[in-house]
Amino acid sequence: MTCPRDWIHHNASCSFNFFHLVKAGISEESYHQATQALLPLAQQSTSGFWLYFYEMILE
């Protein structure tokens, strides 16, 4: 995974696996489980996008 398109696809694939936990507002605990898994992924992706953008500007 070296380009933003790949990151987005990866995030969507990972997120889909947690959709059942949040689709119908099942419980607060289910949201916690999904967030616990997906928040680090979102943070890493955001960092990756910033770095990608920064490196593009430096070129």
Image: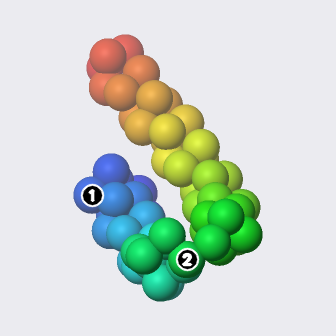
Up the image or down, 13 lies above or below 2; here it is below
In what quadrant of the picture does the N terminus appear? bottom left
Drawn side of residue 57 relative to residue 17, left or right? left
Q: Quadrant of residue 9?
A: bottom left
Q: Residue at x 37, y 15 (%)?
A: 58
| Residue 14 visible here | no
Extreme residue toward the left, this view: 5
Q: Quadrant of residue 31?
A: bottom right
Q: Residue at x 27, y 58 (%)?
A: 5
Mark nearer the N terminus (2 vs 1)? 1
In this view of the protein, which residue sits in the foreground, 37 or 59?
Answer: 37
| Residue 41 visible here | yes
Residue topped by disc 2? 26
Mark pair 2, 1: CA separation: 31 Å
The type of residue carrying mark 1 is Arg
* Mark toward the viewer: 2 or 1: 2
Q: Residue at x 40, y 59 (%)?
A: 7
In this view of the protein, which residue sits in the foreground, 32 or 50?
Answer: 32
The type of residue carrying mark 2 is Ile
Q: Position of residue 38 (x, y in %)?
A: 59, 61
Mark number, residue 5: 1
Within 10 Å of the Cα at label 2, are there few (<14), some (14-19), or many (20+) other Cα atoms?
few
In this view of the protein, which residue sits in the foreground, 6 or 23?
Answer: 23
Q: Position of residue 13 (x, y in %)?
A: 40, 77
Q: Position of residue 44 (x, y in %)?
A: 59, 47
Within 10 Å of the Cα at label 1, are there few (<14), some (14-19), or many (20+) other Cα atoms?
few
In this view of the protein, which residue sits in the foreground, 8 or 24?
Answer: 24
